[in-house]
């Protein structure tokens, strides 16, 4: 394949409502990073004003921490663009997004639009003269690991006291530096377990403990 000198590759999903960027060094900018770039630009230019940003339970903890440093309000919803839109309407905010690259920006559209989001990111790059890596300086993205568990009765799944106690023990053992999310998939009959923290060498053991407990229920 002939080498190119492009600065970015931009990828969309099948219906064009999600977007990711990859720069020429191979760095991937998913929805979390793109949402941060958008929010930080709007905040620094005075356009975010008193509004905040809506993410989901999957949004990386590093994004939330950086928003706190920047005094940008942030809240989480369930995974799904409809929950983001509901929360934006409830709070009278206008910007939100998912790690998958689904970004909602009400002044320009009433739902997610990957092409529109990509143009907004490119416009920020053009206006500031900074590339995406420069916009993300100081942004710490915590490692995450996701495991899917197939269950026969996924619709009846509930987090029991025993499972909650196990999760709490894991968090205490890791000084609260571990985030654990358990949720049924909205698209397939599996339970999704997300572990996030500073030390990803612990993730497999944590996932094994949680999976074992779930299968005992």
Image: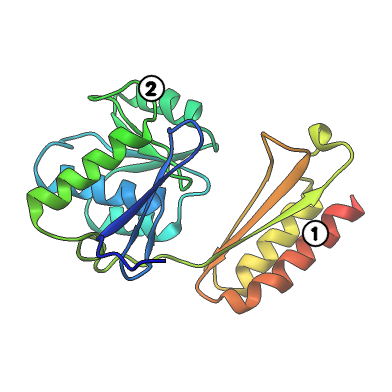
Quick one: SS at disc 1?
helix
- Determine whether, in the image, residue 43 is placed left or right of residue 162: left
Residue 197, compared with residue 152, is above or below; it is: below
Q: Earlier in the sequence, mark 2 or mark 1?
A: 2
Q: Position of residue 116 (x, y in %)?
A: 29, 33
Quarter of the figure that contains the N terminus: bottom left
Tag shown at residue 41: none
* Position in image of residue 92 (x %, y %): 29, 23
Left or right: 122 in relation to 26: left
Residue tagged 1:
211
Q: Position of residue 23 (x, y in %)?
A: 31, 62
Q: Nearer the viewer, residue 200 or 133?
A: 133
Q: Position of residue 32 (x, y in %)?
A: 39, 51
Q: Which of the 4 quarters of the picture holds residue 207?
A: bottom right
Identify whether 152 is placed above or below 207.
above
Q: Secondary structure at mark 2?
A: helix
Q: Of 69 and 19, which appears nearest the observer?
A: 19
Q: Are marks 2 and 1 in contact (CB under 8 Å)?
A: no
Residue at 89 percent across and 40 percent down: it is: 152
Task: Please state if 165 lies on the left or on the right of 112 as rendered.
Answer: right
Seen at 67% across and 67% down, the residue is 170
- Residue 90, label in figure: 2
Q: Separation of disc 2 and disc 1 at Cα?
A: 36 Å
Vertical side of 45 occupied by 193: above or below: below
């Amino acid at each position: 394949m002939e080498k190119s000198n492009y600065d970015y590759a931009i990828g969309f999903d099948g219906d064009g409502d999600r977007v990711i960027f990859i720069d020429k060094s191979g760095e991937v900018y998913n929805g979390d990073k793109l949402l941060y770039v958008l929010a930080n630009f709007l905040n620094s230019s005075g356009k975010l004003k008193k509004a905040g940003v809506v993410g989901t339970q999957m949004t990386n903890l590093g994004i939330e921490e950086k928003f706190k440093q920047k005094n940008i309000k942030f809240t989480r919803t369930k995974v799904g663009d409809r929950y983001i839109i509901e929360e934006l309407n409830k709070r009278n905010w206008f910007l939100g997004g998912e790690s998958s690259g689904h970004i909602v920006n009400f002044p320009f559209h009433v739902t997610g639009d990957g092409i529109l989001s990509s143009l907004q990111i490119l416009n920020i790059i053009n206006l500031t003269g900074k590339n995406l890596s420069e916009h993300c300086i100081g942004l710490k993205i915590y490692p995450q690991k996701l495991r899917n568990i197939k269950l026969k009765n996924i619709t009846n799944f509930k987090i029991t006291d025993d499972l909650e106690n196990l999760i709490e023990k894991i968090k205490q053992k890791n000084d609260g530096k571990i985030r654990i999310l358990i949720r049924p998939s909205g698209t397939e009959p599996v339970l999704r377990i997300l572990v996030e923290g500073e030390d990803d060498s612990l993730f497999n053991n944590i996932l094994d403990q949680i999976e074992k407990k779930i299968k005992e229920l």
